Amino acid sequence: MTAILILAALSEEADALFAGTSTAIHGAFPVRRLVAHNHAINIATCGLGKVNAALAAGLFATDADILLMSGTCGALGAEPGRAYWLAEAVQHDYGANEPGLFRRYRAGDWPMGEAGEAHFAAMPDPGLGLPHARIASGDSFVACPAAAADLKANLGATLVDMEVGAVAQVAARLAKPWAAIKAVTDDANDASGGDFQANLVRAARQAAVEVERLVAML
């Protein structure tokens, strides 16, 4: 039986997954345990930001064969209202501040010298048929068109969030396959706060449906 850890930042995102299963508390993180499609699944609500995501991933990933993440994100030019397979993740706030330049590196690498490729690659898509995207993760909620344009131009990202890049880094460090599916709530602009709240439940369920399809295919 494959052991799968699914992380979600918010309770709305976690509750949308395999609705109706029981809840157990494990330390600081709410965790739901279930069996589906012959997989033993833990669904952990990690909280916002890279530290929370990495801590939860580190605590629960030891016994997991695969790390997944489900939830919501902002768009950096990606089509609104869609769920995406996150083929690549990068941490946009990891790097080196140099005169007139913020040089981005792969999280965990030495932030000096020539910068190489900054992203972490997900496991192969088993054929869900979702559009693929690169997501930029950082410990700030992006609600600024100029900042969004920078991430798109300099990192090639079309989505933004606060957690996936950290989960990807943990998975790489532990040599575990990972995947993430997120659905868009907002356009990373000055309306993002309201749009996120208005679209959170819909987008959380949209991503959860695709994650449940993914689990059935594994």
Image (cartoon, grey):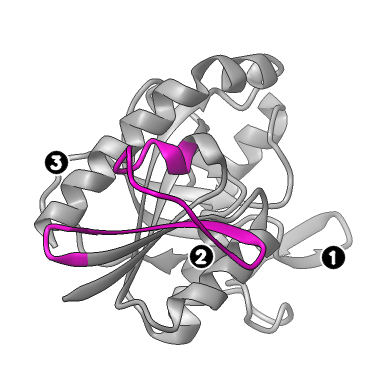
Q: Compute the Cα span from label 1 to label 2.
A: 27 Å
Is residue 117 visible in this depiction of the protein? no
Q: Nearer the viewer, residue 189 or 41?
A: 41
Please give left or right for residue 193 compared with residue 69 in the image: right
Task: Magenta stretch: give its range.
Answer: 13-39
> Which residue lies at the image location 21% right of the left edge and 64% below the top edge?
124
> Which residue lies at the image location 41% right of the left edge and 21% below the top edge?
202
Q: What is the secondary structure assignment of the residue under circle 2?
A: helix
Frontmost of labels 1 and 3 is 3
Q: Earlier in the sequence, mark 2 or mark 3?
A: 3
Estimate the x, y position of residue 137 in percent, counting from the top left.
Answer: 59, 52
Label of residue 216 in the image: none
> Which residue lies at the image location 60% right of the left edge and 44% below the top edge?
151
Tell me, yes or no, whether the highlighted magenta stretch contains residue 185.
no
Please give left or right for residue 160 compared with residue 61 in the image: right
Q: Which residue is mark 2?
A: 167
Q: Nearer the viewer, residue 178 or 152?
A: 178
Res 78 quadrant in image: top left
Estimate the x, y position of residue 136 in percent, counting from the top left.
Answer: 55, 50
Judge the density around disc 3: few (<14), some (14-19), many (≥20) Cα neighbours within 10 Å: few
> Which residue lies at the image location 52% right of the left edge and 69% below the top edge?
57
Is residue 138 visible in this depiction of the protein? yes
Q: Which residue is mark 1?
A: 98
- Up/down of 65 relative to 156, above or below: below
Label of residue 129 in the image: 3
Frontmost of labels 2 and 3 is 2
- Where is the N terminus found, in terms of image quarters? bottom left
Tell me, yes or no, whether the highlighted magenta stretch contains residue 27.
yes
Tell me the amino acid under the disc marked 2.
Answer: Val
Tell me the amino acid under the disc marked 3.
Answer: Gly
